[in-house]
Image: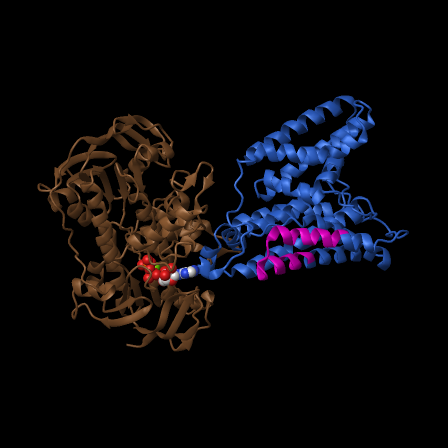
Amino acid sequence: MKTLLEIEGVSKSFGSVIANEDISLTVREGEILALLGENGAGKSTLVKAVFGLVKPDTGTIKINGTVMESGDTAAAIASGVGMVHQHFQLVPVMSVTENMILGDEPKKFGVVNIKQAKKEALALSEKYGLEVDPDAIIEDLPVGMAQRVEILKALRRDVKLLILDEPTAVLTPQETDELLEVLRNLAKRGVGILFITHKLREVMAVADRIAVLRGGKLMGTTTPKESSESKLAQMMVGREVVLRVEKSVAKPKEVLLSIKNLRVNDDRKLESVRDLSLEVHAGEILGIAGVEGNGQRELVEAICSMRSRLSGEVVVKGKAIPNLNPRAAHLAGVSHIPEDREKHGLVTSYSIADNLVLNRFDQAPFANGWIRNLEEVASNGEALVEKFDIRAPNASLSAGSLSGGNKQKVVVARELSQQLDVVVAAQPTRGVDVGSIEFIHNQLIAARDAGAAVLLVSAELDEILSLADRIAVISNGKIVAIFSSKEADRNTIGRLMAGLAS
Amino acid sequence: MKLRTSHYLIIAFLAAFTYFYSKDGLVATSVLYTAIQFALPLALAAMVGVMCERTGVVNIGIEGTMLISAFTAFFAGAILKNTVQGMLVGVFTGAMMGLLLALMAVNWKMDQIIAGVIINILAAGITSFYYRQNYSIPSTLDPIDLPVIGAWPILGPVLSFHGPITYFGIFFILGLWFALYKTSWGLRSRAVGEHPSSADTAGVSVSRLRYLNVTAAGAVGGLAGSYLALEAVGIFERGFTAGKGFTALAIMIFGRWNPLGALAAALFFGLTQAVTNQLMIDEVVEIPPQFINMLPYILTIVVLAISAGKVRPPAAEGIPYEKEKS
Ligand SMILES: Nc1ncnc2c1ncn2[C@@H]1O[C@H](COP(=O)(O)OP(=O)(O)OP(=O)(O)O)[C@@H](O)[C@H]1O
Ligand SMILES: [Mg+2]
């Protein structure tokens, strides 16, 4: 098979951070190359260089034998490169259709033919099994849906080399399987694929070859046959990683979080949490299993008082949380790891240190009355960067310059480093590397053991099964069953999630 | 809110029209005719803002662009003894001002407010330094007597007999609306103004589009300046634009960055001014003229206060695009 992409000696630094160091890689036609590496290893930087979004300091990139001018995205597109971006490149105020056609619009007499575009969007969504509403506005969509749009957008153009930067982080297991199938078919047709993921299972399932980056350097390439999940993990992190969660038996105590007859609307003003009641005890992790879009997001936002409740109560430590007052929820002891770290977790233009005190910047010791205590903020920042292994040269850099997984770690660090009563964790390990998943899981268990009530929402059934002490299945805005972790059975839960009676 | 703007307009319009018509039909039509004349430069100037801000570039240099274009249009017209050539010079001057703004904002990634201030200061300086008395243009641009429409009752004399820039301007605004919402240029421009990295990753060159739009917008500003000097009054004075370029920004916001919304808002402003003028002439109200001259500014403040907090500007406006920061 012909070589499609040649990366030769590419290096790139951002200030003092060396993101890529002398990397050489090739992708052949019809080949699926998986790119693995810890958060901040330089994966995104490398593929962005291929797509002309980052100008390498040295090195060349050849596509089909032609040297690409660095930093020329249009040229990369013209030579058949398509990319699914880790940070969605979607215009928030525009519709799904408009986003999909941007840059390559179907036209009739110079006018955008939006009808045809819509038809195309629907056909595409059907063809690849990724359901989207072509008229929906991007900013109203949950991340899973936005991810589908981002993928379809890349598939719409006839690509020869497809780059996917963590496309599966927010997809449901079924969607992931379908996407992997799509990738296989594309590869059969000769498309070269460069696929970034943190999920080793996916790598083992589809990759022809695997390249591992660590600290900006290429550690080597291997194949699924020659390696195993634990070997890959070790290659990425440089130490042994426990892929299975180890925890003691929970010792649940009094109820800390109780939700009574909660009803909440989603963004389209449809009732998506319907008369839901739930109790979480101190010292336990309650996992919410469900297919995304069954009210999890609205439930979490209503608990944290970020979304208006139609009726019902959220009670923390015996005190009802007022409606639409996130600060009151925080002060009552609710820690929140939001599912969308970019939108609700971080102010990307602020420093890492400021982001780490975002919910308590005005409280001692980070402030004396009205005056902020910047020294304390800085030292807290450095300490948490150290403790949570956030890969950044120092905490005074902007949070926006962090890699995706490290952004997530900043949010986790902030929320788990305070007095813990109730922890609401929505997709806490989304986009996080295996080493950090282990770390975050251990932190959640530690929070539980310290007496916190942990509510874990995750689209990963595996995560729920391995972490939760009790598992509540949500379907259509209602809790349809609750299991203890001993009774929990994958198939039963899967059927319940899909809305079938068990 | 787009609706609201037009509602205000219709109510104000009907009230004013009924009032004047009940007194004298001729006066009523002349008030409306003047309203269009007052509105046009504001509407065109607001289009400059719309075109720039929709692609993410803040332009507070509209005032300066209009001023210097009115200046060059007038003196070129006077020296060449040709009003039409003067207008072309005015439009060209405006385009050059746009190009200058694009250079500062896109290439040099300067703070766009400062870039706009520079243009305003530059224009004020040049136009007063080189200002000469005793020049005159051969004639203002000839008004056009519209066939058919001109013969309509009531509306005929309101719509007919405006100058060429007025008619062109109105068609331009309608065309801009269509282009902005229906063509790929519009889709791309709006994407660049909202989320430039999305456009970039779709293969749309952010800087090229910003250059194009800001320069073209400058030309429109030049046309607005030419209108004032060559079509509306036929003279040039120091500080001739009298804040219209700033009022235009308020009109753009009131019109929600939508060309039609801004046109409606401009007509509303124009009507208010025409009505007040007529009331003064009729001596219905006795207000010192200074207060009348304050009217556009007061109205601007009121309008901004009404729409503040409810409008949503293009998300990326004022932010230079840097590729590797996305
Ligand atoms: N625009 C930027 N400015 C400054 N530093 C940057 C920038 N982009 C990336 N970096 C740094 O370069 C390093 C590599 O980042 P990159 O995004 O390539 O990591 P990654 O492997 O994709 O990680 P993740 O799995 O978390 O997405 C990180 O340390 C990051 O902080
Ligand atoms: Mg990345």
Q: Quadrant of residue A241?
A: bottom left
- Indicate the colour of chain B: blue
Q: Quadrant of residue A237?
A: bottom left
Q: Residue at x 23, y 69 (%)?
A: A208
Horizontal side of residue B93 vs A378, given as left or right:
right
Asked whether A180 falls inside the magenta stretch, the response is: no
Q: Position of residue B37 (x, y in %)?
A: 74, 40
**Of the pair A245 and B140, the residue shown nearer to us:** A245
Colouring of the image: by chain
When the figure is inspected, residue A195 is found, relative to residue B60, above or below; the finding is below
**Of the pair A181 and B100, the residue shown nearer to us:** B100
**Of the pair A246 and B240, the residue shown nearer to us:** A246
Q: Position of residue A13 (x, y in %)?
A: 41, 67
Asked whether B101 falls inside the magenta stretch, the response is: yes
When the figure is inspected, residue A181 is found, relative to residue B285, above or below; the finding is below
Q: Work out whether residue B167 can be spotted.
A: yes
**Of the pair A88 and A438, the residue shown nearer to us:** A438
Find the residue positioned furthest to the left: A487
Q: Quadrant of residue A316?
A: top left
Q: Position of residue A209 (x, y in %)?
A: 24, 70
Q: Quadrant of ligand 1?
A: bottom left
Give the total number of marks visible in the rendering. 0
Q: Work out whether residue A388 can be spotted.
A: no
Name the quadrant of the C terminus of chain B.
bottom left
Q: Which stretch is magenta?
A: B97-124
Q: Main secondary structure of the magenta part?
A: helix
Q: Position of residue B265 (x, y in %)?
A: 64, 37
Horizontal side of residue A428 vs A379, given as left or right:
left
Q: Residue at x 67, y 37 (%)?
A: B267
Name the quadrant of the N terminus of chain B.
top right
Find the residue positioned furthest to the right: B134
- Indicate the colour of chain A: brown
